[in-house]
């Protein structure tokens, strides 16, 4: 499988002497859905900004789709990687939904007929076609994030970073966005997602979990493997998903649960057998 | 937003559908003929009366609410008093020998009809300007005005004036007005719950309580703009780069008809202005024809 992102020995600090990121190295394959978790101040958001060249790295290299992340390649990078931020209001640039989806396309100097086609195609893909001429104050947070996602997809970007994109949404909005991610993944297996999140349950449904602690990679692996290490996670104050908690308490009571069972429905079916 | 402009009305009249550039041109044209001099005061009031009637007809076509027009005028009473004081009570400069005094005080100080008429004249012009801007703002979304403004500024591109940057700035400002109003409301509620009183107290106390609103609002403004700039950067925005435009402005048949009508009106009033100014004997034509006293 081809690499979408390769990070080699990355260092970054905002102030001298305080390293925000220390010797970070990892690869992300194309089509992977990676959850990046860690406490506030662990460097997650900084890492996402470095990946998009919104901040320049101090030391080390990043390759996005084999393009090195540096100043000369900035415009090339904008055609590879996109980011959805936390606050849905602050990234809504256009005055209406269609203007906002078109914003990135306008920046690329795409002819108008093509823009209209792309705006309609991707607005319907994220389920916002009915809201094309609505202004942001008429939309919910989840809908605004959908628009942000459509804006990125319309540009044909294959790598999308969610920088706590669901943390300001209500539970319904969160479910909405999670479902949308899953749908998009099914539709285009080439899409790579990096989701920076505090939501352990979201991390659990990803393909891979990277845990950052104090600017270093603490754990990296499949969610099932990573969340097995309950004691290690507790040592840095992170929780484990609900299903893992249930499984481990059942194990303590000598109830054997097969490893393939990964969600609540399967578990309840198994227990009721 | 409704405090700043007349609120956009949700109708789909002919005026709503007109191209925003035509509407802006028409506004400028009407404002110019509002401010043209039409000879003596009798002439001025009658000609401006005709113009006001035309404006009222346009308001009716655009389904402008007469109520919001009146509420806009309500804030003018202070201005009216101010104008009256300035024009009536402040001694007139220059030669006043041909003026018509209303009262003469024992010390020789006079109040003239001319002063009264002048203040009424200015007031009348202001009322018409408000009516005109109300028609524009209640029929045109703010964004369309930005597009029109950008279009009008296009010739400046020859001297490398960054017109796109200006219009982007304006459209972002317009985009964030409701968001920031919302934020201000939230902060106000939060501060009220902590015991800040925005209504009672003397001016000094009020100013103090307003700072509890302004400081957090400004700081959130800065963090918002920071994030906004990151988001724009991430989506490949280059202020001086070549951008295509999603919105296009199209001139239709109605727009041309409207332009011609506006042109005819402007031409007619300019002609009247010319005749009342320059042609001998026409200066007092209303006086001659209708026997209205010439001032």
Image: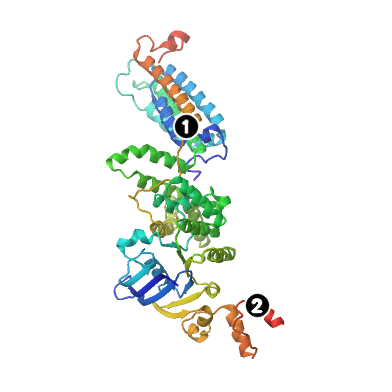
Above or below A202: residue B184: above
Disc 2 sits on a residue from what chain?
A
Report the residue marked by disc 2: A266
Q: Residue furthest left?
A: B159
Q: Residue furthest bottom?
A: A254
Report the residue marked by disc 1: B132
Q: Residue at x 50, y 39 (%)?
A: B6
Front-most of A256 and B118?
A256
Above or below B185: residue B261: above
Front-most of B140 and B103?
B140
Measure how far apart labels 2 and 1 are at the Cα level: 68 Å
x%, y% of residue A14?
33, 70
Is any part of residue A16 visible from this angle? yes
x%, y% of residue A104?
43, 54
For the C terminus of chain B, give its image quadrant.
top left
Q: Residue furthest front?
A: A1
Q: Nearer the viewer, mark 2 or mark 1?
A: 2
């Amino acid at each position: 499988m081809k690499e979408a992102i390769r990070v080699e020995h990355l260092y970054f600090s905002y102030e001298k002497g305080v390293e925000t990121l220390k010797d970070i190295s990892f690869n992300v394959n194309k089509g992977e859905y990676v959850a990046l978790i860690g406490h506030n101040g662990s460097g997650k958001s900084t890492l996402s900004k470095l990946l998009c060249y919104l901040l320049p790295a101090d030391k080390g290299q990043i390759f996005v789709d084999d393009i090195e992340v540096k100043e000369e390649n900035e415009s090339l990078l904008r055609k590879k990687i996109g980011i959805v931020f936390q606050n849905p209001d602050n990234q809504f640039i256009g005055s209406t939904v269609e203007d906002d989806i078109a914003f990135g396309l306008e920046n690329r100097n795409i002819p108008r007929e093509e823009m209209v086609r792309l705006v309609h195609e991707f607005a319907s893909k994220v389920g916002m076609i009915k809201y094309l001429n609505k202004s942001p104050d008429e939309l919910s947070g989840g809908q605004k994030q959908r628009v942000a996602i459509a804006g990125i997809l319309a540009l044909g970007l294959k790598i999308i970073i969610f920088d706590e994109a669901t943390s300001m949404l209500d539970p319904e909005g969160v479910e909405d966005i999670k479902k949308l991610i899953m749908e998009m993944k099914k539709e285009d297996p080439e899409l790579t997602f990096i989701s920076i999140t505090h939501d352990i349950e979201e991390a659990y449904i990803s393909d891979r979990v990277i845990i950052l602690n104090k600017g270093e990679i603490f754990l990296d692996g499949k969610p099932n493997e990573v969340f097995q290490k309950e004691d290690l996670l507790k040592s840095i104050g992170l929780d484990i998903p609900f299903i893992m908690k249930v499984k481990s308490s059942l194990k303590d009571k000598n109830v054997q649960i097969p490893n393939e069972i990964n969600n609540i429905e399967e578990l309840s079916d198994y227990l009721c057998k | 937003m409704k405090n700043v402009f007349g609120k956009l009305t949700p109708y789909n009249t002919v005026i709503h559908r007109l191209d925003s550039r035509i509407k802006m041109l028409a506004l400028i044209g009407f404002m110019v003929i509002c401010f043209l001099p039409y000879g003596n005061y009798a002439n001025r009031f009658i000609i401006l009366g005709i113009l006001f009637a035309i404006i009222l007809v346009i308001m009716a076509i655009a389904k402008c609410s007469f109520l919001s027009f009146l509420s806009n005028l309500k804030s003018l009473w202070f201005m009216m008093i101010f104008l009256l004081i300035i024009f009536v009570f402040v001694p007139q400069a220059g030669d006043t020998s041909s003026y018509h005094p209303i009262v003469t005080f024992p010390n020789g100080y006079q109040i003239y009809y001319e002063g009264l008429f002048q203040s009424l004249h200015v007031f009348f012009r202001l009322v018409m300007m408000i009516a005109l801007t109300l028609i524009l703002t209640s029929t045109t979304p703010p964004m369309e005005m930005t597009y029109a403004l950008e279009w009008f500024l296009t010739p400046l591109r020859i001297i490398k004036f960054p017109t796109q940057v200006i219009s982007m700035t304006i459209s972002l400002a317009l985009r964030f007005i409701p968001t920031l109003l919302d934020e201000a409301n939230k902060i106000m509620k939060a501060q009220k719950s902590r015991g800040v009183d925005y209504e009672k107290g003397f001016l000094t106390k009020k100013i103090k309580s307003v700072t509890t609103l302004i400081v957090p609002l400004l700081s959130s403004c800065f963090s918002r703009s920071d994030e906004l700039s990151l988001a724009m950067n991430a989506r490949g925005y280059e202020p001086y780069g070549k951008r295509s435009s999603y919105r296009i402005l199209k001139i239709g048949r109605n727009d041309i008809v409207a332009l011609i009508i506006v042109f005819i009106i402007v031409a007619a009033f300019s002609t009247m202005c010319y005749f009342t100014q320059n042609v001998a004997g026409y200066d007092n034509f209303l006086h001659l024809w209708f026997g209205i006293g010439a001032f």
